[in-house]
C-alpha cells in the first residue's frame, strides 16, 4: 500500500522534523543542562564565578573548533579576529559575559526552575511592553503562551506536588 506524498503532507512532515522535533530536543538538553548545573552549583557548593568561567572557556573552544570549517573562520584567518570591531562591538560582548555570571548566580541561589520561570515572565513582559509601544494587539499565540506560563507558575507554586509526594511517602 503505497501513498503518494502531497505537497501539504511533505510540508507538514518538515514542520515536525525541522521545527517541533529540534525544539523538543533543545528543550530537553536545556533542562538537563540546567539540572546538572544546579546540582554542581548547589550540592557540590561550586563557586558560580568559576563555574561561569569554565563554561565560557568550553564555549570558546567549541566555537573556535567550528571556525575551522566555516566561511567566517576563513575570513578571520585572512583578516584577523578583530577586523571591523568598534567600541560598540564590546557592548554585546560585555552584556553576554555579565548575563552568564548572573545566570550562574541565579541558578546557584534560586535554582533552574525559578530561573526558567523568570525567563518566561521576562518574555511575557517583553511581549506586553512591545505591544503597548508598537500599538498592536497581542497575537493569539502570545496570549495562549502567557496563559500557559501563568498556569505552570501557579501549579508549581501552589504546592500541590508537595502534597502528592507526602501522600506517596506515607
Image (cartoon, rainbow, N blue to C red):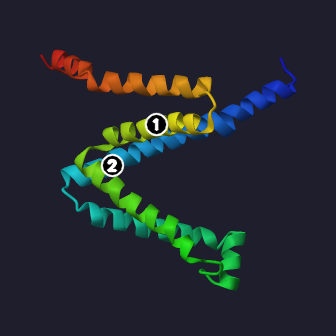
Q: Percent from the top left, x then y, of residue 93?
A: 49, 68
Residue 151, image quadrant: top left
Q: Percent from the top left, x then y, of residue 86?
A: 59, 77
Give the camera-side residue of 47 and 89.
89
Q: Residue 156 carries which label?
A: none
Instruction: Please name the residue that numbered disc 2 is placed on.
Output: 36
Image quarter hosting the N terminus = top right
From this view, report whether residue 88 is shown above or below residue 143. below
Give the camera-side residue of 19 and 126.
126
| Mark 1 closeness class: few <14, some 14–19, many ≥20 residues within 10 Å | few
Q: Which residue is drawn at 33% across and 23% down?
A: 154
From this view, report whether residue 62 is shown above or below residue 35. below
| Local SS, label 2 | helix
Real-space Cα separation, disc 2 to disc 1, in angstroms: 28 Å
Q: Which mark is residue 125?
A: 1
Residue 137 seen from this side: yes
Give the camera-side residue of 151 and 44.
151
| Local SS, label 1 | helix
Quick check: 164 left or right of 69? left
Quick check: 107 left or right of 122? left
Residue 12, image quadrant: top right
Q: Nearer the viewer, mark 2 or mark 1?
A: 1
Quick check: 101 left or right of 20? left
Q: Percent from the top left, x then y, of residue 3?
A: 85, 20
Amino acid at each position: 500500500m503505497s501513498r503518494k506524498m502531497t505537497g501539504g503532507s511533505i510540508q507538514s512532515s518538515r514542520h515536525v522534523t525541522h521545527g517541533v522535533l529540534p525544539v523538543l530536543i533543545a528543550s530537553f538538553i536545556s533542562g538537563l543542562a540546567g539540572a546538572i548545573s544546579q546540582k554542581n552549583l548547589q550540592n557540590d557548593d561550586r563557586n558560580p564565578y568559576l563555574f561561569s568561567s569554565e563554561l565560557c572557556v568550553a564555549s570558546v573552544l567549541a566555537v573556535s573548533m567550528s571556525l575551522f570549517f566555516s566561511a567566517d573562520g576563513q575570513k578571520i584567518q585572512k583578516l584577523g579576529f578583530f577586523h571591523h570591531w568598534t567600541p560598540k562591538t564590546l557592548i554585546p560582548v560585555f552584556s553576554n559575559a555579565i548575563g552568564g555570571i548572573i545566570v550562574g548566580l541565579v541558578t546557584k541561589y534560586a535554582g533552574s526552575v525559578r530561573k526558567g520561570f523568570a525567563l518566561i515572565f521576562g518574555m511575557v513582559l517583553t511581549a506586553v511592553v512591545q505591544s503597548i509601544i508598537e500599538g498592536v494587539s497581542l497575537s493569539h499565540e502570545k496570549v495562549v503562551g502567557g496563559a500557559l506560563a501563568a498556569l505552570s507558575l501557579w501549579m508549581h507554586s501552589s504546592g500541590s506536588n508537595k502534597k502528592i509526594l507526602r501522600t506517596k511517602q506515607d
